[in-house]
Image (cartoon, rainbow, N blue to C red):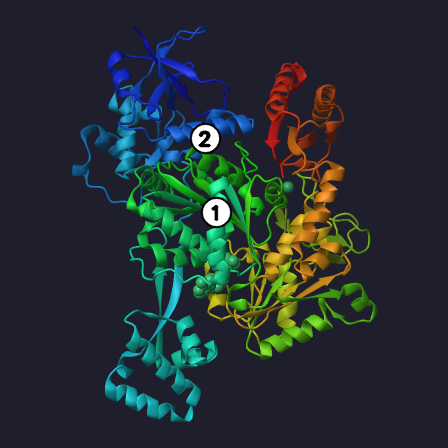
Amino acid sequence: MLHFIDVILPIPVENLFTYVITEAESDFIKPGMRVAVPFGKTKVYTAIVKRIHNTPPEIYEAKQIQQILDEYPIVTEAQLRLWDWMANYYLCTVGDVMRASLPNAFILESETLISKNKDKVINDTDLRDDEFLIYEALQHQSSLRIQDIVDIVDRKQVFPIIKRLLEKEAIVVEEEVFEKYKPKLVKYVKLQNQHTTQEGLQKLLEELSRAPKQRDVVMSLFQLSAKTKKAIKVSELVEASGASASIIKSLIDKSVLEEYFIQTDRIEYNGEASEASKVLNLEQTEALSQIKTTFETHQVTLLHGVTSSGKTEVYVKLIEEVLKTGKQVLYLLPEIALTTQLVNRLQIYFGEQVAVFHSKYSAHERVEVWNNVLYNSSKAQVVLGARSSIFLPFNALGLIIVDEEHEQSFKQFDPAPRYHARDTAVVLAHIHGSKTLLGSATPSLESYFNVQQGKYGLVEITKRYNNVLMPDIELIDVKDKQKRKLMTGHFSDRMIQVMAETLEEGHQIILFQNRRGFSPIVECKTCGHAPECPNCDVSLTYHSYRNQLRCHYCGYNMAMPLKCQACGDTSLDTKGFGTEQIEEEVKVLFPKHKTGRMDLDTTRGKYGYEKIITAFEQQEMDILVGTQMLTKGLDFRNVALVGIMNADNLLNFPDFRAHERSYQLLSQVSGRAGRTEKQGKVLIQTYNPFHNILQQVSTNNYQAMYKEQMDDRYNFKYPPVYRLIRVTLKHKDFNRVNMASIWLGKAFRQVFGDYVLGPVDPPVARIRNQFHKNILIKIPSKQSLGGTKKAIVKINSSFMNVKDFRSVRLILNVDAY
Ligand code: ADP
Ligand code: ZN
């Protein structure tokens, strides 16, 4: 009897491929193992075994595999099921999903380039002969192709050797220019050595007798050190002594104190769990028990808890219970919310059981987490990760938590699979027979809709922890202020006044300026010409820190011109305002206070993001100006005022979710204010103080927002009432993409009638010299999703058969919002 395997290739082909294997191989091979297989005339790929059977393929003669690469499956059966679901639901190939799932180092193929791992010292004696040959060759050549390696070792089947070299970390697979995950530097203080003896301290206190504040700091530090053996953070000292950071700074300058840094590395956390989890208050206890009750009847529960209601502590209790049963927990959150703050908080409770998975991890780190998860190692009981961690090989998954479930960044836009991690998580949990908990202070309409439909359970926490009041939100009418000449730059008199009061009280301020669609562009005051990107249909934006004009879509940049390129006049004006401009203005308004900025530009460098957060946390800055990045789950104790510079461009953004998103964003930013005792203050500057969304934000009225937005979604046939599939066509020739999109629109209309919108130009119709057209297909809830997709796929294949259209790229995006 002949034996065959069906394998998944990491390329976008529709079908699985069948290879023939020997009897012995068939005893050994299991689904989920990797095999090296020949493909086409010359290529070799790493494929994943899907099925083992005895039926030869009908159309072609099965080739033999080259080699089995694993001793055990590296992909679980549950993953294979999830891959099928994703390919099917998101209209892509299983190969697309495979490529997105596996760490790069797992997918060797003939195109793979390998090079020497410069970060690792390898002893020749640790290498086998064939390994040594390759390693040796890499001393002289920066990289090698698979074919080169075949020649060097004079053998066809080289993947196993490469795999061993990868495992020994002697080599790396090309394309792995990942940034290392950013460790956090925490600042600590101690007394300088000469003051630590009994006499030394006595003498010091005498010296400081005329500076009582400084003396208090020294006393506090001494008491703290006596109490705990651990190093003392600057922030702890600030808290214990009640002194400001500047007093501590002056003691450092006087050489009384010494500051030093310790790097808290997130992946190699060696600490023990050092604290028991917190005792829940009444609301949290109630919420926890309700969650468990809803889980008896629901697969998914939504925890709707206002900002700072203590949702995280509720998650912690649930996690504890799941861990007790020996199962794993996946804790998903948006990339940018994956801060050290949260990681540290969980590590305090769970010690090294916490594993972090991040797209910025190096290949080796990814493989390490992968294996820890696969073997249910004690080091990966709680996996904390961004969207791609749904691809990890869980084998005993007990619970998935999706925090900040409303966040758009859970959706992958490019490349395929264009999945939504929250929705995929629900399916993943289902495959494992476990539950999903979604959490948010501002749930997405679709999740809340699922609650209303009875699909999801709902649990609410309406009070902040410790009964801290919700921030007091005040709307400022910019139009009125302008009329009465009460604006200084972009600041209203009211904003300036409250800022001054806040600073006076020693509290910190966050100023929020939305970046999207609102970077400053340059315009000629004389002729009105605005420089545009040569490759994309957008204006270039001005970046003063490099005095450059840049394209946000393709990265094109040029030096800021001295005069208008159209009329030659020198009166160029930077219109609009971004974070940079706000920062400049603040510095003029409050020259004595320290201002910082957090946006893509300032966080780009190494540790940029962490450094700013840490500095702000430790109160080295009084005012932080920032973009969206500020909204995500950060817990700053001392922030008493949040100022929103301009709410209007959020509201006016051309997207059917603009209002929902504005509500979420504004509520989340507001939530950063007053997270401890004192009630926080939020000021929102706007031209439309009577806009419903702003009213709803200022009264914290989620229900009203939900109801009003849902009415719109019903009326205009948008999600979550209708499903949405977006078809994008791209080509460098405008006429061709235009014709193709008209053809396709017509074909869709024949099947779906009025539920087809377009073709239309997207807001930016040309990107990187490719013209884009969009067609939207709306699917009523009663219409079969499967059937609709089949019809779409069928139309697409006839489209591809039109000769003129073959070169047009077609992109399908399911739930494209
Ligand atoms: P959320 O996730 O809902 O925004 P957090 O979980 O961050 O809220 O909680 C807000 C703050 O309240 C945190 O600083 C947290 O440490 C504190 N907190 C929450 N619950 C408790 C508790 N049961 N005991 C002590 N502190 C708590
Ligand atoms: Zn461009």
> Which residue is the site of mark 1?
293
From the top left corner, tell me how far across and down residue 347 is, in percent: 36, 56
Q: Foreground: 779 or 773?
A: 779
Q: Residue furthest left?
A: 125
- The residue indicated by pointer 2 is 82
Residue drawn at 61 percent across, 62 percent down: 670
Distance between mark 2 and mark 1 Cα atoms: 27 Å
Left or right: where 169 falls relative to 698: left
Q: Residues within 10 Å of mark 2 (few under 14, many from 20)?
A: many
Circle 1 SS class: helix
> Is 490 located above or below residue 792 in the figure?
below
Q: Residue at x 51, y 40 (%)?
A: 421
Structural crowding at the residue carrying mark 1, measured as other residues with C-alpha within 10 Å and reported as few (<14), some (14–19) or many (≥20): some
Camera sees residue 634: no
Instruction: Using the image as rendered, state which of residue 542 and residue 712 is in the foreground.
Output: 712
Judged left or right of residue 107, residue 201 is left
Residue located 28% across and 16% down the image: 26
